[in-house]
Image (cartoon, grey):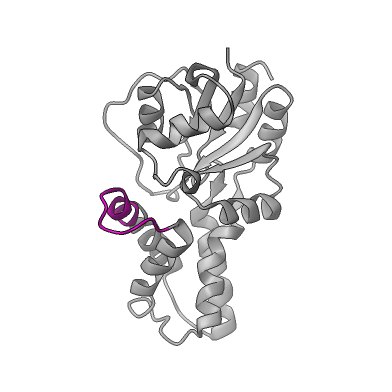
C-alpha cells in the first residue's frame, strides 16, 4: 500500500540543537565571546512554533522559516551578548539552519528506504533551506516538499493533503515519518499512514520530550535503519 515516505526534518532527520551549538561555538571562538550556546539554541527553537502560529492565525502575512528564524534571532542577540555581530555575521549565523547535521542513522537508513520507496521531505522549512541542508548533509531525497509550497504550516491539513497531491498518491499510500506525535496525529487526520521514530536526544541528554496521550501509529521504529527493516526495505 505504501508508495512514498514524507519526512519531518528538524529533529527527525537532523540534530538541529547539536548543530546550532557547534555553529555558535565557532562564532564564539572567532569573536572571543562567552555564550551559553545550549541555552541559546533552546531559546531560538522555542520561538519557532509561536512564530509559525502567528502566520497560521493571520497575525503575520506568509513568512518563510528563514525570515521567522531571523526575527527570533534578532530578539536574542542582545540578551545573549551577541549585539556586536556585524550584519554579515548575523546572516551567517541565521543560515546555520541550512547546515544542520543528520543523526548517525539518517543517511544509511534513508538510502535503504529509497531502494523501495519515494522519499520526500515534508517540513516547515523553506525550499532553499531544505535543498542546502540536503546538499550539505548528503540527504538522498527524491524530492523536496515544503510548507512553503502550500502557503500553510504544519499541522494545517493543507500541507499533508498537498504532499499527497503533488506525489500523485491517495493519502493512504503516503506515510508521514516524524519524531513528533502531534505532526503524525495531524497527518492521520487526513488519511496518511504514520511512522513514529522518537529522537530522545533532540533536546539534549536532559531535554524535554513530548508527553501526554498519543494516537496509535502504523509503525514505531527505533531509528531509520529499524524503520527500513519494518517496512521491508
In magenta stretch: residue 31? no
Image coordinates for residue 75, horizontal then vertical, percent: 33, 73
> Who is closer to the viewer here, 142 or 61?
61
Splitting the image into 4 quarters, where does residue 47 fall? bottom left
- Which residue is pictured at 55% across the width and 65% down the height? 95
Residue depicted at x 40% and y 35%: 158
Residue 79 falls in image quadrant: bottom left
Q: Quadrant of residue 26?
A: bottom right
Q: Residue at x 71, y 47 (%)?
A: 138
The residue range painted magenta reads 50-63
Position of the N terminus by quadrant: top right
Residue 179: x percent and y percent? Answer: 46, 36
Please tell me which residue is depicted at 69% across the width and 55% down the height of the picture.
136
Q: Is residue 114 above or below residue 25?
A: above
**Residue 54: in magenta span:** yes
Between 136 and 37, the one nearer to me in the picture: 136
Residue 180 in sight here = no
Amino acid at each position: 500500500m505504501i508508495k512514498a515516505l514524507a519526512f519531518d526534518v528538524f529533529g527527525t532527520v537532523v540534530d538541529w540543537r547539536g548543530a546550532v551549538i557547534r555553529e555558535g561555538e565557532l562564532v564564539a571562538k572567532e569573536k572571543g565571546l562567552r555564550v551559553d550556546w545550549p541555552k541559546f539554541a533552546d531559546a531560538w527553537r522555542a520561538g519557532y512554533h509561536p512564530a509559525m502560529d502567528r502566520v497560521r492565525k493571520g497575525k503575520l502575512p506568509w513568512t518563510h522559516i528563514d525570515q521567522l528564524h531571523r526575527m527570533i534571532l534578532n530578539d536574542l542577540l542582545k540578551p545573549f551578548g551577541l549585539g556586536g555581530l556585524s550584519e554579515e555575521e548575523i546572516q551567517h549565523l541565521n543560515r546555520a539552519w541550512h547546515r544542520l547535521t543528520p543523526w548517525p542513522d539518517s543517511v544509511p537508513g534513508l538510502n535503504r528506504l529509497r531502494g523501495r520507496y519515494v522519499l520526500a521531505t515534508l517540513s516547515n522549512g523553506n525550499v532553499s533551506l531544505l535543498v542546502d541542508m540536503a546538499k550539505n548533509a548528503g540527504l538522498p531525497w527524491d524530492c523536496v516538499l515544503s510548507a512553503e509550497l502550500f502557503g500553510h504550516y504544519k499541522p494545517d491539513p493543507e500541507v499533508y493533503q498537498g504532499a499527497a497531491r503533488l506525489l500523485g498518491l491517495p493519502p493512504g499510500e503516503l506515510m508521514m515519518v516524524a519524531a513528533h506525535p502531534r505532526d503524525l496525529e495531524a497527518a492521520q487526520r487526513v488519511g496518511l499512514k504514520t511512522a513514529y521514530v522518537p529522537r530522545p536526544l533532540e533536546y539534549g541528554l536532559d531535554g524535554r520530550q513530548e508527553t501526554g496521550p498519543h494516537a496509535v501509529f502504523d509503525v514505531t521504529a527505533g531509528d531509520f535503519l529499524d524503520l527500513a527493516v519494518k517496512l521491508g526495505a
